[in-house]
Image (tube, rainbow, N blue to C red):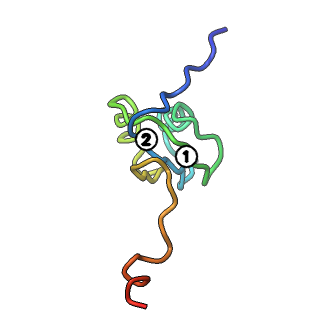
Amino acid sequence: MAGRRAAPKSGPMLRVTWVRSTIGHKAAARGTIRALGLHRLNQSVEIADTAANRGMLRRVAFLVTVQEGTGQTPRTEPEAQHEAS
């Protein structure tokens, strides 16, 4: 049995979060969600920013949210507020 290929850690990454259920959708949408590595609703995974992954995301765009970047959490307070005080 072949093992899973690990995504390259270098290069741009996408953070994908599964936000809508696949109940009532076609099997192809469910399969694409699984192929992206998502198993539970509201789960997030980081995947490589490749043409193949972008194509899969386009097929299930109505079920997921995508954030570009390396998954760093956004700052809660803008730097402008620190400079003003």
Residue at image x 39%, y 83%?
83
Specify whether 12 is left or right of 15.
Answer: left
Residue at image x 53%, y 55%?
19
Q: Which mark is residue 22?
A: 1
Quarter the N terminus occupies: top right
Residue at image x 53%, y 30%?
35
How many residues crowd around disc 2 within 10 Å: few (fewer than 14), some, or many (20 or more)?
many
How many residues crowd around disc 1 within 10 Å: few (fewer than 14), some, or many (20 or more)?
some
**Quadrant assignment, res 45:** top right
Q: Position of residue 33 (x, y in %)?
A: 52, 38
Q: Position of residue 38 (x, y in %)?
A: 59, 40
Q: Tell me the residue that label 2 is attached to.
A: 13
Q: CA distance from mark 2 to mark 1?
A: 24 Å
| Amino acid of disc 1 | Thr
SS of the residue under disc 2: strand
Q: Nearer the viewer, mark 2 or mark 1?
A: 2
User: In the image, is residue 49 above or below residue 18?
Assistant: above
Outermost residue to the top: 1
Specify whether 51 is left or right of 62.
Answer: left
SS of the residue under disc 1: loop
| Amino acid of disc 2 | Met
Quarter the C terminus occupies: bottom left
Q: Which mark is residue 73?
A: none
